[in-house]
Amino acid sequence: MASALKNLSTYDETNLPSAAGLSFGIVVSDWNADITHALYQGCLDTLVKHGVSEDDIRTAQVPGSFELPVGAKIMAGVKRFDAIICLGCVIKGETQHDEYINNAVATGLTNLSIASGIPCIFGVLTPNTHEQALDRAGGKHGNKGVEAAVTAIRMASLRKELAKPSAKIGY
């Protein structure tokens, strides 16, 4: 759904499980730092708001969005996180670089999620302009960092819930 139709910071807080006791990695791209650092702040604030201790959050910075999957892989090798959130911003330019980078990052994070079993969240803005990026980094369309944190909490909680042994009847 287009963020023009739904605010990225709006979610049903009553339907979100507590994140207390969960641990999260956050990988942030330095490219477009005014945007990505705003995404990071929204993400961090949302995690803490829902019970995550700041001691259970580890942050790493990478040069650009293209490096997010490798940053997430390195982070996954350091500690077993319940989810890893990747935040970046690739603004469309005069060439098709944005398509190559966005596809590579999405594919890399999907493959890492599947291979590691750790949800790796795609919190990457893919706007046409810097103004559109600002609108999605705390502006009129909310903050994609908030949405990424909510997604991470939901996926980490799902993973934790499904890891519990289920009751078996008669077998």
Image (cartoon, rainbow, N blue to C red):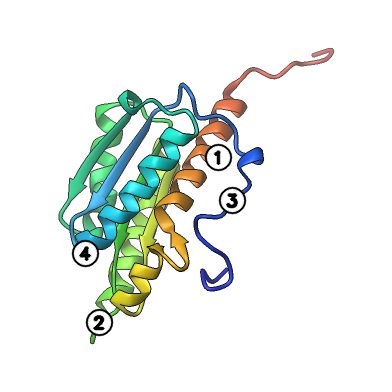
Asked which secondary structure carries label 2, the reply is: loop
Sequence-wise, the earlier of marks 3 and 2 is: 3
Residue 98 placement: quadrant = bottom left
Q: Which of marks 1 and 3 is in front?
A: 3
The amino acid type, in three-letter code, at marker 3 is Tyr
The amino acid type, in three-letter code, at marker 1 is Arg
Which percent across, then down, holds residue 123?
39, 55
| Alpha carbon separation for disc pair 2 and 4 | 13 Å
Q: Name the residue under label 1.
A: 154
Task: Evaluate whether residue 118 shows in this view.
Answer: no
Residue with the most extreme top position: 170
| Alpha carbon separation for disc pair 3 and 2 | 31 Å
Q: Nearer the viewer, residue 168 or 55?
A: 55
| Alpha carbon separation for disc pair 2 and 1 | 34 Å
| Alpha carbon separation for disc pair 4 and 3 | 26 Å
Asked which secondary structure carries label 3, the reply is: loop
| Alpha carbon separation for disc pair 1 and 4 | 27 Å
Sequence-wise, the earlier of marks 2 and 4 is: 4
Q: Nearer the viewer, residue 110 or 4?
A: 4
Residue plotted at (37% across, 75% down): 132
Sequence-wise, the earlier of marks 1 and 4 is: 4
The amino acid type, in three-letter code, at marker 4 is Asn
Q: Mark 4 points at which residue?
A: 32
Asked which secondary structure carries label 4, the reply is: loop
Residue with the most extreme right position: 170
Q: Which disc is residue 93 wearing?
A: 2
Q: Which of marks 1 and 4 is in front?
A: 4
Which percent across, then down, holds residue 39?
34, 54
